[in-house]
Structures are given as C-alpha cells and as structure tokens.
Image (cartoon, helix red, strand yellow):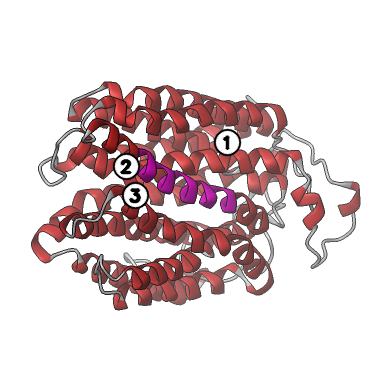
Amino acid sequence: MLGGIQFSNPNRYSLPVRYLIVILTFICTLVCYIERVGFSIAYTVAADGAGVNQSSKGTILSTFYYGYACSQVPGGWAAQKIGGRRVLLLSFLLWSLTCALLPLDPNRVLLLVIARLLVGIAQGFIFPSIHTVLAQWVPPHERSRSVSLTTSGMYLGAALGMLLLPTLVKFRGPESVFLAEAALGASWSLLWFKYATDPKSTASGVGESVLPVNKKIDTHNTKLPSAKIPWVNILTSFPVWAIVVNNFTFHYALYVLMNWLPTYFELGLKLSLQDMGSSKMMPYLNMFLFSNIGGVVADYLITRRILSVTKTRKFLNTLGFLVASLALVVIPSFRTSGGAVFCSSVALGFLALGRAGFAVNHMDVAPRYAGIVMGVSNTAGTLAGIVGVDLTGKLLEAAKAANSDLSSPESWRIVFFIPGFLCVFSSFVFLLFSTGERIFD
C-alpha cells in the first residue's frame, strides 16, 4: 500500500500507471538535487573551516560534473538497450552507496575527487533514463506537464536542501548530510523497485490526434523502427543542436547559482545562511512553481490549438530566457538579502519556465530516441557545470586578489553577466533552429 492506494496490481486502482511513474520520477529528481545542494553546503562549511581557497573549492565542486558528463550518452544508450527502469535503479544504488561510505575531509583531496566522480557518473545515467521512461509511458498531449513536474523535483529538492541542510550541518556536522542523502537514495530505490514497471506498448503515438501539427519524419526513417540508432542524423540535426545550446546555457546559470549562491550570500553580502531562514530556499521554490506553470501553459496552448507545438516551445523558451537574463545581470546591484533573493528567484524561476520549451523538445523531435537526445544535450549541460563552476571559482579568486575581499559588487558582476549573455544568445538560437515536429522515428 502507498498512501491508501494499492500499486502491486495496476488493474486494481484508478490512478493510471503513467501517473505513478511520473510521481516516482519527480521524487527521483528531488532526491538527486538534495544530494547536489547538500554536498555544496556540507563541503563549503568543511572547506572554509580548513582554510581551503575559492579556486580549490571550485575545482572540487566541479569534479562531479566530469563524471556526470562522461555518462550522459552512455546513459542514453544503456536506457535504450536494457531499459530506463533498470538503469535508474542501478544508478541510484551506486551514488547512494558512495555517499554512505564517503568521509568528508577537505584535506583528502584525492578521495573526494574519486567519490564525486563516482556520484557524477552514477547520476549521469538518471536523466537520459527518465526521458526514456517518460517517452514510453506519457502520450504527447501530456508531455509538457509531465516533464515539467518531473524536472521540478530538482528545484524543490534544491529548495528543501537549502532550507533544511544548513540546520543539519549546524547541529550534526557536515558528515551527517551524506548519511541523510544515502538514506533518501536507498528509500527511493526501494519504491522504484517495488512499484515501477515497463509499459506493454509505447505511448509515443497515443494522443497524437489532439496535436495541431503534422509529423515530419526523416525519409531515412520511414520504415518500421529498428534497433539501430541514427547517430549521424541526430548529431547533424539543427533542431537537436538548438536543444543542446539551450541546455548548456540553462545548466551554466543553474550550476553557477546552485554552487556559488551560498558563497555570494556569505562573502558577497556578509549574511549567514542559518540566519536567513526560509528566504534562502525561495529561488529554488520559485523554480518548482514556474516549471509546473510552464508545463501546464504549454499543454494548454497545444491542446486548445492556440499555438502549434513549435510556436509554443519557442514562445516559452524565449520568454523564460530573456527575463532570466535581465534578472541575472542586475543581481550584484542589490546589496540586501531581499534584493538578492528576489533577483535570483526571478532568474531561476523564468529559466525553469523556459524548460517548457527546450527541455520537452527532446520528446517532440525524437520520441523513440528521447534518452539518446537527452544524453547528448545533457552532456553539453554538464560541460556547462564543469566550465561555469570552475571558471567562477577562478574569477572570484582573481577578484579577491584585486579587491582584497568578495564583498564588492564588482567582484561578482562578471560572474552573473556571463550566464545573462548566454541566455540572450541561446534564446535566439532556439528561435531560429528549433521545431516541435517529429524528425526521427
């Protein structure tokens, strides 16, 4: 039994199985981002206590993304070949075990690097697998809100992590964060093992009649689907590259804020995370809300035939990224906690709204290969994490040398200008090259 509903036999309850799958994938992303925010918080406290400089902190924080980048495309391939359900379970077990066994000692750099690489590799399999699972279960007219709900778990997880974990660190120490994360990972694994199933048939064609678009299939793919993955077509497709560019930008902004916002609050504004209370979770809570708003709006525009799938994706992506760009650029101009929280909340909220554009587009253009396309685009997003997090550490170290500390707005202006500029650039790329029509079958 789960919440009064029996899930062991899909025929004995009224909740459609695909809704259960979406709920479980939502919890999956929530737990993953509690882990990511948790490491940032716990390691920052431990590293500051050990006198680790900002550049070294940036290196350790970015190590996760090297492993994450390496496993994105293999994750899509594995999900395609052996099933997203199985790959999700194995990846969760691996990173949970690594968290449980990792001692947090900032001076044991090699051990930290190896552990974060392992966690990154394991979590790199998760999102391509989720997209494979959702493409199998969710019909086209429910995709926007299903993907938005699933990915909004990332932001709610980050919000909960920012709210709860500083207190856990304060009373139980940084090490306690890893044990709590491992317990959450193991609990989700048990739920997934017990209740997740594979569909008897794909949902990619269900509900096509409600969509106001025609399918534009590549001439090379007009035959019945085969096991062969059209790598060349995928990697040379302009609509795929439009997704890739926007995924890079989204994650550059997200990972820079996720990893360095605690430092900005504490060193840039001289605030204590513990003393900020619930306000520090608002940027991520805003992402949770706007992600789901974007999904509902997108499906409404499509199913009511107000806009085509292509125009809907372009409209929400452009609106989200342009507003986020403005909010990012002005963050250093606000020198109070309220102003910084407001600007970062607007920036992250509208970035999440933009995910109803590019992030759902994987399943529009290639429902059968959604995991593969997600793996390719998420590799770019992960590279953004490597570049953005590490570069930000070096920029701040240089600013500290020039300004003696990091409390000056000038120390942070370039940090937030870079993702702001990328948002403008990538929104124009998406406007020019994206499509909502299926181009691979």
Q: Is residue 361 found left or right of 275 in the rendered image? A: right
**Judging from the image, what secondary structure is the residue with disc 1 in?**
helix
Tag 2: residue type? Answer: Glu
Q: Main secondary structure of the magenta part?
A: helix
Q: Name the residue located 29 percent from the left edge and 41 percent from the top edge.
A: 261
Q: CA distance from mark 1 to mark 2?
A: 36 Å
Task: Pick whichever of labels 3 and 1 is earlier in the sequence.
Answer: 3
- Span colored in magenta: 378-395
Task: Pick whichever of labels 1 and 2 is earlier in the sequence.
Answer: 1
Q: CA distance from mark 3 to mark 1?
A: 34 Å
Q: Name the residue located 61 percent from the left edge and 33 percent from the top edge.
A: 313
Camera-side mark, 3 or 1: 3
Mark 2 Cα shell of 10 Å, populated few (<14), some (14-19), many (≥20): many
Q: Are marks 3 and 2 in contact (CB under 8 Å)?
A: yes
Which residue is denoted by mark 3 in the rendering? 55
Q: Is residue 253 found left or right of 244 in the rendered image? A: left
Height in image: 434 above or below 360? above
Q: Is residue 161 visible?
A: yes
Percent x, y of residue 218: 86, 46
Mark 1 Cα shell of 10 Å, populated few (<14), some (14-19), many (≥20): many
Percent x, y of residue 64: 43, 60
Percent x, y of residue 228: 81, 65
In the picture, the disc for residue 357 is 1
Q: CA distance from mark 3 to mark 2?
A: 6 Å
Tag 1: residue type? Answer: Gly
Q: For residue 187, what is the image quadrant?
A: bottom left
Which residue is denoted by mark 2 in the rendering? 397
Mark 3 Cα shell of 10 Å, populated few (<14), some (14-19), many (≥20): some
Camera-side mark, 1 or 2: 2
Q: For residue 130, what is the image quadrant?
A: bottom right
